[in-house]
Image: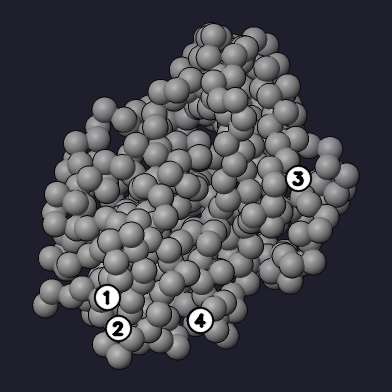
């Protein structure tokens, strides 16, 4: 039966949700204040991370915590005035990061990740987007021998538990594979199953174009105007009010603001991040994750994209790109990054939950309202998987992955 659906948010998650609903014949309106893929989904490292079967835990060793507290690294920064608001979800995040809990959470998380490339490929083929994708993997690079040895052992464990293909490269092999490197490193793990996208925002745009070819409608509008009606939901747009029987909240880091207006309180927080492109130097062949310094160097259409780790700050706080300055100095030890493309760094935010799992399913307190948010670092990776899962739930089907671990009512 065809249903009318409003999907709020045109990032990778919202666009894929709308696309999967359109593929099932539903009449879908995708609403965003901007065009598709122009917010969080634009600013990532462009990786469909098949190897990322375990979510990022809260650090628990004192050396790392002290370095973060003193703001000594490039991987984490924080605004002091933001900490009171995020303290409660961060405490829960820390609790869920205990080895026992994290292992259980990783099982549910890994079940999503293991399907990411297959589900992307289905949409890439239909959207004609193969020109944006490289299927040669990417590298974890290590400066320190001890961390290299630890990384190699972890990679071997992931091969045994998840079948994740990789090659362990010593310093000589890495230098030969990546001649753009300016110094010798301890070694690398070349993950073979991860895909790299040369323009993440454009891939979302291609998916959105496919959605429109299937009859989907895209309009600009304000998600904050969402209201329940006698028959469903209404949202204000530039084209006038749009009404539908069902609505999906897929607003990424902005989901919490809307949900609070509807009476929901979830342990959500954002990790802000920065990137900038550079030209004029010799680019690495594949994306490089500098494990010991917490930054990514990725060759893309616009140049070499340098991305930072996490910044804990209010979503609307002014940019403080000190991490990117540090990251540029550290990355320049590895590759030449002479000319910035943008006048100022790009800033975005990742939507995170305290238990590191997304929120997917029917809203506990409202009929016809659905949630698909909280994908943290992997919204770009998981868009097609989670879009398909929510579409199956909305059609009353039994999803091909058990969605119980991601249910919206689990925090009550």
Residue at which label 2 appears: 232
Whichever of labels 3 and 2 marks the residue nearer the N terminus, that label is: 3
Q: Is residue 40 left or right of residue 35?
A: right
Q: Secondary structure at mark 2?
A: loop
Closer to the observer: label 4 or label 1? Answer: 1
Residue at image position (83%, 55%) is: 80
| Label total for image | 4
* Cβ–Cβ under 8 Å for marks 2 and 1: yes
Q: Quadrant of residue 195?
A: top left
Residue at image position (13%, 65%) is: 25
Q: Is residue 187 left or right of residue 166?
A: right
Q: Secondary structure at mark 3?
A: strand
Residue at which label 4 appears: 262
Q: Nearer the viewer, residue 89 or 347?
A: 347
Residue at which label 3 appears: 77
Whichever of labels 4 and 1 marks the residue nearer the N terminus, that label is: 1
Q: Secondary structure at mark 1?
A: strand
Q: Nearer the viewer, residue 263 or 270?
A: 263
Q: Let me know if residue 184 appears in the view.
A: no
């Amino acid at each position: 039966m065809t249903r009318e659906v409003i999907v709020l948010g045109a990032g990778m998650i919202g666009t894929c949700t709308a696309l999967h609903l359109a593929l099932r014949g539903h009449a879908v309106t995708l609403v965003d204040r901007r065009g598709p893929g122009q917010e969080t989904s634009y600013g990532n490292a462009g990786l469909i991370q098949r190897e990322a079967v375990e979510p990022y835990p809260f650090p628990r060793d004192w050396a790392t915590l002290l370095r973060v507290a003193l703001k000594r690294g490039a991987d984490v920064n924080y605004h002091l005035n933001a900490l009171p608001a995020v303290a409660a979800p961060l405490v829960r995040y820390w609790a869920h990061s205990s080895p026992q809990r994290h292992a259980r959470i990783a099982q549910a998380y890994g079940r999503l990740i293991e399907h990411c490339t297959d589900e992307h490929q289905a949409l890439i083929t239909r959207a004609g987007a193969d020109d944006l994708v490289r299927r040669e993997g990417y590298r974890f690079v290590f400066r320190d021998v001890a961390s290299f040895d630890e990384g190699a052992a972890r990679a071997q464990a992931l091969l045994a538990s998840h079948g994740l293909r990789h090659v362990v490269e010593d310093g000589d092999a890495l230098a030969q594979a990546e001649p753009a490197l300016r110094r010798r490193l301890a070694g690398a793990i070349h993950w073979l199953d991860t895909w790299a996208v040369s323009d993440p925002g454009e891939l979302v745009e291609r998916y959105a174009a496919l959605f429109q070819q299937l009859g989907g409608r895209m309009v600009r509008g304000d998600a904050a105007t969402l209201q329940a009606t006698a028959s469903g939901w209404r949202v204000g747009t530039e084209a006038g009010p749009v009404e539908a029987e069902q609505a999906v909240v897929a607003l990424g880091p902005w989901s919490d603001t809307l949900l609070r207006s509807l009476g929901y309180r979830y342990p959500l927080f954002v990790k802000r991040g920065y990137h900038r492109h550079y030209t004029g130097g010799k680019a690495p062949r594949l994306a490089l994750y500098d494990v010991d310094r917490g930054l990514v160097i990725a060759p893309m259409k616009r140049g070499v994209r340098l991305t930072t780790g996490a910044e804990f700050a209010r979503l609307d706080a002014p940019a403080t790109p000190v991490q990117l300055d540090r990251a540029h100095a550290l990355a320049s030890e590895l590759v030449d990054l002479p000319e910035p493309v943008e006048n100022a760094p790009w800033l975005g935010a990742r939507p995170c939950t305290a238990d590191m799992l997304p929120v997917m399913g029917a809203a506990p307190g409202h009929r016809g309202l659905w949630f698909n948010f909280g994908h943290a670092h992997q919204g770009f990776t998981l868009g097609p998987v989670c879009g398909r899962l929510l579409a199956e739930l909305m059609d009353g089907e039994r999803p091909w992955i058990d969605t119980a671990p991601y249910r919206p009512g689990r925090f009550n």
